[in-house]
């Protein structure tokens, strides 16, 4: 019987964990009773260097329930790295791995539908929101703008999908070979290429705690995704440079014509504005190119993306041996 692992990255989630743990254990028990997943199925909480009592709570749940395991990172490494750590740790113990955020705003009831899709032969099942009625106008507008921007940058990304998905064991094994340090999982997972589908759901309001994704982090993720997966910005700058050169040539022709016709007017303002504009384009170009060079610098160092401090999932290996 196929074993299910639910990977839950956590950062300062002490207020939400009681509800989260109860709901996820209930889901696993129901699937086990229905004969859809094996009795070795489990939840893996990944503590991403929380500063509250998150890890202590996870350890207590691990002692109380055979379904709960925990992985503690030595320091805060970011959501994408924490999720990656959980996926790579779980692939040796689970046949299908579902990733979901600890706030459970993503509807856990569709996990069963994801499992059904896996049984039908799909390796990747994306959780996709039906609508964004629970978002503020600002968040809804910026989120939709984000997906449209990704598409415009030629990045293969699933519309209205975050990191709520099911992956088969072999899909995670392929993912483990993607060793880049600048992680953007929403862009990497579609590159795997295995058979995939989607399930839709309505996103809920957060039960407890506060969002770990303010606008600044969303903006940072968008920039990370663009610069990690697309060279379109560099091509746009090249085209802009060519366009500016063309306008400069036309302006030079017009200036020469004005000089010959005797209609020369002092152009201090136009000269200064031109200098500022071209200077701004140059600075923007240098900064963007510097970002790409910086990413190359980070990749060639090949430093670990995260360090594991505690992993009680290893106990599962001894239990099964």
Image: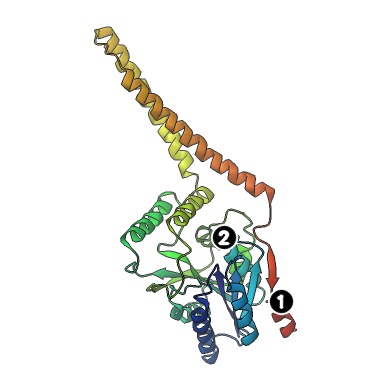
**The N terminus: image quadrant:** bottom right
**Residue at the front extreme of this rendering:** 52
**Residue 6 percent across, percent down from the top left:** 56, 76
**Residue at the bottom extreme of this rendering:** 33
Residue placed at 48% from the left, 77% from the top?
A: 114
**Element under disc 1:** helix
Q: Dot 2: within a 10 Å radius of its alpha carbon, few (fewer than 14), some, or many (20 or more) residues? A: some
Q: Is residue 95 visible?
A: no
Q: Is residue 319 visible?
A: yes
Residue behind mark 1: 314
Of callouts 2 and 1, which one flags the residue occurring earlier in the amino acid sequence? 2
Residues at marks 2 and 1, CA–CA distance in whole angstroms: 23 Å
**Residue 43 percent across, percent down from the top left:** 58, 79
Quick one: 215 or 257, which is closer to the camera? 215
- 241 is higher (above) or lower (below) than 144: above
- Residue 243's disc number: none
Of the two numbered discs 2 and 1 in the rendering, the one whose residue sits closer to the viewer: 2
**The C terminus: image quadrant:** bottom right
**Residue 92 percent across, percent down from the top left:** 67, 74
Q: Dot 1: within a 10 Å radius of its alpha carbon, few (fewer than 14), some, or many (20 or more) residues? A: some
**Residue 181 percent across, percent down from the top left:** 61, 54
Based on the displayed image, in which of its 4 quarters is residue 137 positioned? bottom left
Residue placed at 29% from the left, 14% from the top?
A: 266
In-image side of 196 versus 39 (left or right): left
- 292 is higher (above) or lower (below) than 187: above
Based on the displayed image, in which of its 4 quarters is residue 258 positioned? top left
Task: Determine contact: label 2, label 1, CB under 8 Å.
Answer: no
- 146 is higher (above) or lower (below) than 30: above
**Element under disc 2:** loop
Residue behind mark 2: 78
Quick one: 93 or 222, which is closer to the camera? 222
């Amino acid at each position: 019987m196929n074993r299910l692992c639910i990977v839950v990255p956590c950062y300062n989630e002490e207020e939400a964990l009681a509800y989260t743990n109860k709901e996820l254990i209930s889901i696993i028990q129901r699937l086990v009773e229905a004969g859809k997943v094996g009795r070795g199925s489990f939840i893996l909480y990944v503590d991403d260097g929380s500063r509250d009592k998150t890890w202590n709570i996870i350890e207590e749940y691990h002692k109380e329930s055979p379904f709960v395991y925990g992985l503690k990172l030595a320091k805060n490494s970011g959501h994408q790295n924490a999720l990656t750590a959980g996926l790579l740790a779980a692939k040796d113990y689970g046949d299908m791995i579902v990733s979901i955020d600890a706030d459970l705003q993503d509807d856990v009831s569709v996990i069963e539908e994801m499992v059904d899709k896996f049984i039908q032969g799909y390796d990747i099942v994306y959780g996709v929101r039906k609508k964004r009625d629970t978002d503020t106008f600002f968040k809804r507008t910026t989120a939709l703008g984000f997906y449209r921007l990704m598409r415009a940058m030629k990045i293969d990304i699933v519309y209205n999908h975050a990191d709520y998905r099911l992956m088969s064991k072999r899909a995670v094994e392929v993912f483990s070979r993607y060793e880049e340090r600048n992680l953007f999982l929403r862009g990497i997972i579609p590159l795997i290429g295995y058979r995939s589908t989607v399930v839709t759901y309505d996103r809920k309001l957060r039960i407890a705690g506060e969002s770990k994704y303010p606008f600044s982090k969303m903006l940072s993720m968008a920039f990370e995704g663009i610069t990690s997966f697309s060279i379109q910005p560099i091509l746009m700058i090249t085209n802009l440079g060519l366009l500016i050169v063309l306008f400069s040539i036309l302006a030079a022709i017009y200036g020469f014509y004005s000089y010959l016709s005797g209609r020369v007017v002092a152009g201090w303002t136009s000269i200064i504005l031109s200098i500022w504009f071209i200077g701004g384009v140059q600075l923007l170009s240098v900064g963007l190119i510097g970002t790409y060079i910086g990413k190359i610098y980070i990749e060639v160092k090949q430093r670990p993306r995260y360090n594991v401090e505690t992993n009680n999932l290893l106990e599962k290996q001894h239990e099964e041996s």
